[in-house]
Amino acid sequence: MVNGQVHLGIVGLGSWSRQIFQAVGQLPEVKITHCYSRYPDTREAFASEYECVACEQYEQMLDDPQVDGVVVMSSNVAHEKDVTLAASKGKHIFVTKPIATTIAAGQRMIGVCAQNGVLLAVGHQTRREPALRKLKEVLDSGELGTVRLVEANYSTPNGFKIKEGDWRGAEDECPGGVLILVGIHAIDTLRYLLGPVSRVFSWQDDGGLKVDGSWVTATLLDFESGPRGYLGSSYVSSFSHWIKVYGTKKNAFFDELRGLTLTEDSWEQGAVREKVAPPSNVTAPMPAVIEEIEEFARCIRTGESPEIGGEAALHNLAVVLAAVKSDKSGKPVEVASLLTE
């Protein structure tokens, strides 16, 4: 750190990287000083726009003693390599979801960070949306009563943009297709709200796309805490991101574009609705992204643990991979069985 300011490097300069740069721009205690992409034009453009050093090699930022941590935004299969190298150089690490594409890779990443005494934070920002924070507060208060059922959907039309040969169509790089690309956001949020998933049963198909992969998925969920649920995720539908929680006293309905509403509807009274949180702010810089980067920098300064570390992210990945296995076998799959293989 220089004068108390946390200095970060960033590797991987895709579209989501702009969210990170713009979030850091809201945090005077954080600065991105180095960036790296394997494409020279891309890194030079980012360096010019955001006033940081364009590194010709990833190792260049890792060898700079003023760099405290690295934001890993590279492709899914590159996460292990990039995290391992950064950890070996003593850099703290924030890696975008998913932590990896295999459980073994994720476990190795957790291990190498522990061995080198560096922080590992994972970017599952969705649970940080204010309306979902409010939903967690409502659940913990007991206002909904006993929860036995939850439904969720996270879908986008981005599948129509996939071209032949895209890494998203490769099972080793994108297992579960839409489930690991966007459905995992809902998986993490549901874990945050209700605790770990113990068992899944899933159906997946290509959604009519001419690209290999699972682009329409429907997954049943058993939670260790008791509730059962359903998660739908499609890459060939218009945007949808909602969660419905059904309690013995009230129901809660979160919609990213509409906010959080509690309901006590009945035949006798009709619709009884209370809006308790506004829609999410999805304009860059997103508050949820600002929060996770601010937390990462704070953890570097104080040594505290991040809200979403390696183990939580590994469970999210295990749910995705259990769903893939269930679709192939036609049987329910215990999530723990993947974590202990």
Image (spheres, rainbow, N blue to C red):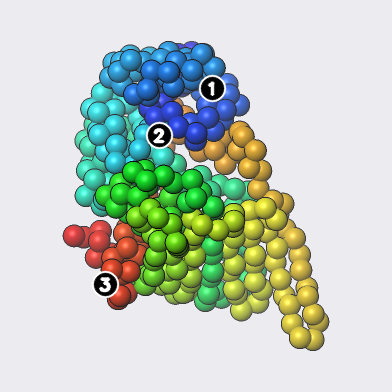
User: Residue placed at 41% from the left, 15% from the top?
Assistant: 54
x 44%, y 15%: residue: 44
The amino acid at mark 3 is: Ser
**Residue 214 occupies which quadrant of the picture?**
bottom left
Question: Which residue occupies 65% across, 38% down?
Answer: 283
Q: Name the residue under label 2.
A: 73
Per the image, label 3 sits on a secondary structure element best described as helix
Q: Do the residues labelled 1 and 3 touch (CB within 8 Å)?
A: no
Tell me how far mark 1 sits from mark 3, CA to CA. Answer: 50 Å
Q: Is residue 235 left or right of residue 248?
A: left
**C-alpha span from label 1 to label 2:** 21 Å
Which of the labelled discs sits on residue 329, or is there none?
A: 3
* Quadrant in which the C terminus appears: bottom left
Q: Earlier in the sequence, mark 1 or mark 2?
A: 1
Disc 1 vs disc 3: which is toward the camera?
3
Determine whether 84 is above or below 123 in the image. above
Give the residue pinned by disc 1.
29
Q: In which quarter of the image is residue 73?
A: top left
